[in-house]
Image (cartoon, rainbow, N blue to C red):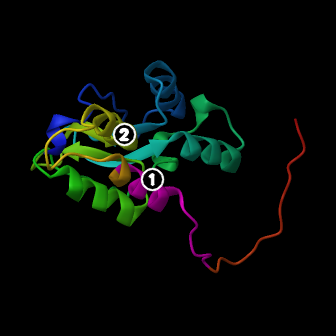
Amino acid sequence: MNVSAIMTRDVQACGPGDALAVAARIMRERRCGFVPVVDARRRVIGVVTDRDVCLALLRADAALTEVRVDSAMTAEVHTVRPESTVEDAERTMRAWRVRRVPVVDARGRLEGVLSIDDLARRAVEARGAARGRVTERDVARTLSRIVGPTRVIDVPAEAARVRPRR
């Protein structure tokens, strides 16, 4: 089965120069925690998650309207193509430990998003279906790899700085 069969197609994106308020509004309205970031040609250049928004606001100690998306987004984006198999997409998600991947055309333009939720819904719908389906076991394996324990990376520690409230 191809990614195009189960991906979410009606995806709203934001631009790198938009305020984080734009991304947060999309997340609230669409009930999601992930927004692709696209350039003027709708090519995916990054992604921003609800966690990215929170961390950027903490770093900047500023309001949603004062911080730009490009200061919070992840620019190293792992994508899949609509014609990719679901199994290949799951491997990508497991390898990069991501719950969602933008689906892009040959020119890198956004066509949709494939999420772990899409995989889970397909597994439930396909229960008992023919060979080649997404199974609940596949989804569980992918999710466990994404959220499972990670190796600790040696990062130099900084003294915690707490800024007084204004």
Q: Which badge, 1 or 2, comes first in the chain's sequence?
A: 2
122 in relation to 134, above or below: above
Classify mark 1: residues with Cα within 10 Å, few (<14), some (14-19) or many (20+).
Answer: many
**Going 17% across and 48% down the picture, which residue do you hit?**
108
Q: Quadrant of the C terminus?
A: top right
Answer yes or no: is residue 98 visible.
Answer: no
Q: Amino acid at mark 2?
A: Ala
**Going 77% across and 71% down the picture, which residue do you hit?**
158
Q: Which residues are magenta?
A: 139-153
* Prevailing SS of the magenta stretch: helix
Pointer 2 residue? 120
Where residue 114 appears, as percent x and y from the top left, is 29, 41
Q: How many marks?
A: 2
Where residue 131 appears, as percent x and y from the top left, is 14, 49
Q: Amino acid at mark 1?
A: Leu
Q: Quadrant of the N terminus?
A: top left
Does the stretch in magenta take in 150? Answer: yes
Where residue 18 appears, as percent x and y from the top left, is 44, 33
145 in relation to 83, above or below: below
Does the stretch in magenta take in 114? Answer: no
Pointer 1 residue? 143
Between residue 113 and residue 159, name the one nearer to us. Answer: 113
Q: CA distance from mark 1 to mark 2?
A: 10 Å
